[in-house]
Image (cartoon, rainbow, N blue to C red):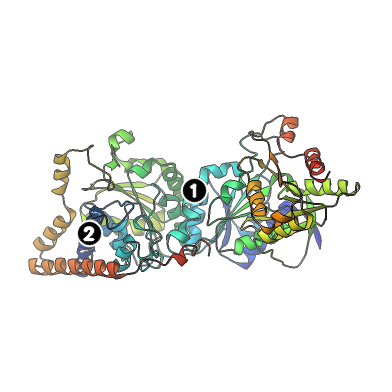
Amino acid sequence: MAISKAKHKEMYIKMLHTRLFEEKVAYFFSMGMVHGTTHLYVGEEASAVGACSALDEEDLITSTHRGHGHCIGKGIDLNRMMAELLGKVTGYCKGKGGSMHIADLERGNLGANGVVGGGHCISVGAALTLKMKKKDNVVVCFFGDGAANEGSFHEALNLASVWKLPVIFFCENNLYGMSVPVSKSMNIKNVAERAAAYGIKGQIIDGNNIVEVYEAVREAREYVKKNGPILIEAKTYRWLGHSKSDANVYRTKEEIASWKEKDPIKWHRNYLESNGIFTAEELDAIEKQAKEDIEKAVEFAENSPYPPLDIIMEDVYA
Amino acid sequence: MSVITYAQAIRDAMSEEMRRDENVFLMGEDVGIYGGAFGVSVGMVQEFGEERVRDTPISEAAIVGAAAGAAVTGMRPIAEIMFSDFMTIAMDQLVNQAAKMRYMFGGKAKVPMVIRTAGGSGTGAAAQHSQSLEAWFCHVPGLKVVIPSTPYDAKGLLKAAIRDDNPVVFIEQKLLYRKKGEVPDEEYIIELGKADIKREGRDLTIITYGRMVPTCLKVADDLAKEGIEIEVVDPRTLLPLDKDTLIRSAKKTGKVLIVHEAVQTGGFGGEIAAVIADSEAFFYLDAPIKRLGGLDIPIPYCPELERNAVPTEEKIREAVYALVR
């Protein structure tokens, strides 16, 4: 089934939101306006947005430490997300979580995760709920190539395959676990090859091609409900450092530049224009809208108060 | 009243809650047809089926992590970790995920899950199957920690734990599984965080929990014949801790001995001692607060070595004499 015009628009603006959000966050960090650390998603937008856009509203996701794209893909409120980054009480977690712990349970986002591989087992449990409650939904478990070497990866894929749970294990292979390239951290070329070990389907896709990502996940959505989990590996690349401390000494400028040629946002724009789905003017208008949305989010966040000290003890127990 | 074993009490609590609430289910290694390594869930798969009494692969991280994922999406899982020593394999899932979700997410998540696990020495299973790790769990805000010492407490506390909206670590005692006790036929719940005075006395307070409770009660009965009246207080829940009851008893007797099987250094007894020393009970104390924990060693295999690795009746008696004489 062809992707509708409305869906294309939604995906395009969400990729723009992600890119602009991250650029704003990078700016805030460089100015010392927020503390801690952050892991930016620039360059990988098609993976999160394409995958989340292929889901139904009640489908669930687990995310990663590099989770801003997943939040936006799943339809988060940009204002409250930006507020959380600035540690404001109007943020998704009242300023208690920050970049690595944004969750939006109402929209099926079970949370970013500060632990590499932290979402694997949670996604299996969430899928078990779907199965036991006989819901017609799926879970997408996002993780990186680095997380594929955690023990939780093996335990989760094994359990999900034995119980035939509706999980799409979605590996965003951006080629590096912090500084270590995949070639030095696993003895195989593709994470997807590991699917064979669990008797499940493995699939490699171009993570920078949003149409391919969307279609793969849309198909996988039906597949996992009938057959149990699938392992999709999206090949992509992070343009910026792992976190704000990264000086990029482990890769060349040429390599980074070559991936910038494969900019997922530019690719989508070309696709939309050359296929006559939107005109250049319409696309410009969407870009303008996206910028305004981020500016509004910044304004909302900056004008929001910090949490009062008296909430420090709240929310430990239900 | 019926007289049933500790294991039966735990089974009854699970079965009653599973009949009452379809969101409650049990999963773990060999909990199905085998009935669990200690036979706690015998017969449950026949009543509830394999969908609700789930055998899992030997994957402790996945068991606890999946419990967290199921809990945060609307189920109320009970996960069994065969030996509490194996909780080490699931600590990331318990400590970094389940315990912190609610706070990290600003109060939006509820994580109603129970991890049942068998703790303690005395079975000849040596260093990797005999530990008492409760202090580790008590150091994690977001968790609740329960260690029942009788069939009555086990049933009432487990029902409360299953109905609780937080992750609860429920540490069962291997040596108590076959011990029998009276349990009411009608339904009852024991609120978490309430200590129980197992025996009243005026001369000295022993604060103890788990399988050391019957041991301390035995010592108390013996010493009563010598005119020493010991009060035995069982916190039952270590987190949250019923500080008031402990402090009240310390004020009443003026002498406190804390007994637990876990190794003494860094053990939960240190926390209990500090709670009392930090309270108005300090001014009523006639002697230093004493701790009698396990030796600071891995649990050894040979029966006589194993017996002496943890507080024995003799050692408890000596500690009491040292305080009252």
Query: Would residue B179 be seen by someone viewing this image from the given angle?
Result: yes
Tell me which amino acid carries mark 2: Lys
Label 1: element kind: helix
Residue A24 shows which numbered tag? 2
Residue at mark 2 shares a chain with residue at mark 1: no
Q: Residue at x 90, y 49 (%)?
A: B227
Q: Nearer the viewer, residue B31 or B206?
A: B206
Q: Nearer the viewer, residue A128 or A36?
A: A36
* Mark 2 and mark 1: Cα distance apart in space: 37 Å
- Up-down relation of residue B221 to residue B161 (above or below): above
Q: Quadrant of the N terminus of chain A?
A: bottom left
Report the residue marked by disc 1.
B62
Quarter of the figure with residue A6: bottom left
Q: Could you tell me how many numbered marks the image carries?
A: 2
Circle 1 packing at 10 Å, graded few (<14), some (14-19), many (20+), is many
Tell me which amino acid carries mark 1: Ala
Question: Would residue A288 be found to the left or right of residue A193 on screen?
Answer: left
Query: Where's residue A24, x and y in %?
Result: 22, 59
- Up-down relation of residue B300 to residue A133 (above or below): above
Circle 2 packing at 10 Å, graded few (<14), some (14-19), many (20+), is some
Q: Nearer the viewer, residue A192 or B264?
A: B264
Query: Where's residue B140, x and y in %?
Result: 53, 52
Q: Chain of mark 1?
A: B
Quarter of the figure with residue A295: bottom left
Is the residue under label 1 in contact with that under label 2 (CB below 8 Å)? no
- Up-down relation of residue A286 to residue A40 (above or below): below
Question: Would residue A148 be found to the left or right of residue B153 on screen?
Answer: left
Question: Would residue B207 be found to the left or right of residue B3 on screen?
Answer: left
